[in-house]
Image (cartoon, grey):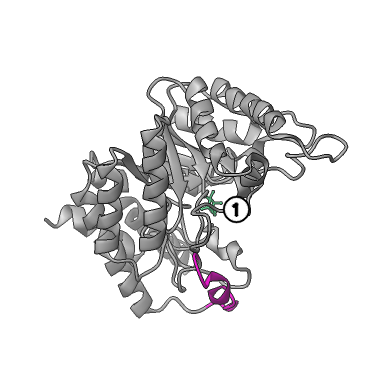
Amino acid sequence: MKRLLILAFFAVALTACTNKDEVPGLKTFIKDDFRIGVAVSPNTLEGVQAEMVKKHFNSMTAENAMKPAGIIRPDGSFDFTQADRIVAFAQENGMKMRGHTLVWHGSTPRGYMNDADGNPLTKEQVMEKHEKYIKAVFEHYPKDVIYAWDVVNEALADTPGESIYRTRSPWYSVFEGPEFIEWAFRTAKKYAPEGCELIYNDYNLVDPAKLERACTMLKEMLDKGVPIDGVGMQAHWDNTVTEEQIQTAIDRFSALGLDVQITELDLTCFDNYHGPGAQERQKIKQSVQYTAEMADAQAEEYAMIFRTLHKNRDKISSVTFWCLSDRSSWLNNFVRGRLDYPLLFDAQYQPKKCYFAVKDVYTKK
Ligand code: GLA
């Protein structure tokens, strides 16, 4: 009896493994459309998650390890240890990476704009200090691994006002305006290896007003000859984003001659937590069950997104999911107290209905 039970256990375990293994890697059917990527931390690159990353993706972004606050130590020296683990994994497995990010108000180390005595640095001092950082970053990573860098992240305002730019930013303050954006791209260009794309990255770019702001800024920069190659649409979306919105944004950006990359794709099961009114919507602190209806709606939305991206594959060079599975999504921490279910794989790393919906876009033509 005991033997039978053990045999039965192994049979069940084997079936579970086989089922999981039978699911084709996203990169096998998305193939030549665009690079397909995932945001990772060094911990993602171990055990079953490492196998999933290798199987499904050919591109990675460091979720946090390549941000300035992940590299710059309090004493001003640089620590690339975490980032290097990810780069090594990419090299061992023939994967490429997106660099994220060089200038972002959200990852500027505390006290970075001050001297050792806490006095504010001048604009010139900040430029000198951060140019050293940008140079060190480009010199550090092997040239053939990183194909694109998010040079500036989230510099635009969410709400209309006097400025189209986010003014509550240490970068905007020290430069007394948005010139830090142009400075960052020109500085990155000085050190970036040949062929590495320089990207402006932001969220909510499907919102008509924010899209308008983005296009105004990008056009102005391009007219001035600022070396910007593409736009990263973060794509932290919810089920209300429409095909028309996505198409309009892609069309507007590519009309400017820019490459489009989808850089941080996930679909919250709550209302969108970005943009005007977001704080109100973040007040829901309780988890909800991931119901069959939610799974259906999410699968439908993901299918629409990938149908649209596939249609525009000549304008898009990479699509990256922000995290591997519902277990490690940043959304589980962003609003504390509630779990979210935004990705193609569940908290047990199993493919969800939305994984199969994406697969159907490619295999059921
Ligand atoms: C923004 C940033 C990312 C990341 C997410 C949350 O989208 O660009 O680096 O911090 O927020 O994980």
Look at the image and give the residue range highlighted in magenta: 274-287
221 or 22: which is nearer to us? 221
5 or 330: which is nearer to us? 330
> x%, y% of residue 269?
44, 71
294 or 148: which is nearer to us? 148
Q: Does dot 1 land on a helix, a strand or a loop?
A: loop
Name the residue carrying label 1: 167
**Quadrant location, the C terminus:** bottom left
Residue drawn at the location 88% of the way across and 37% of the way down: 117
State left or right for residue 311 relative to residue 241: left
Mark 1: amino acid: Thr
Residue drawn at the location 52% of the way across and 58% of the way down: 329
> x%, y% of residue 278?
53, 70
> x%, y% of residue 207?
38, 62
Tell me: residue 67, above or below residue 128. Answer: below
Tell me: residue 60, above or below residue 186. Answer: below
Q: Residues within 10 Å of mark 1 (few under 14, many from 20)?
A: some
Q: Is mark 1 within 8 Å of ligand 1?
A: no
Find out whether residue 177 is within the magenta segment.
no
Q: Quadrant of residue 333?
A: bottom right
Does residue 235 appear in the picture of this structure?
no
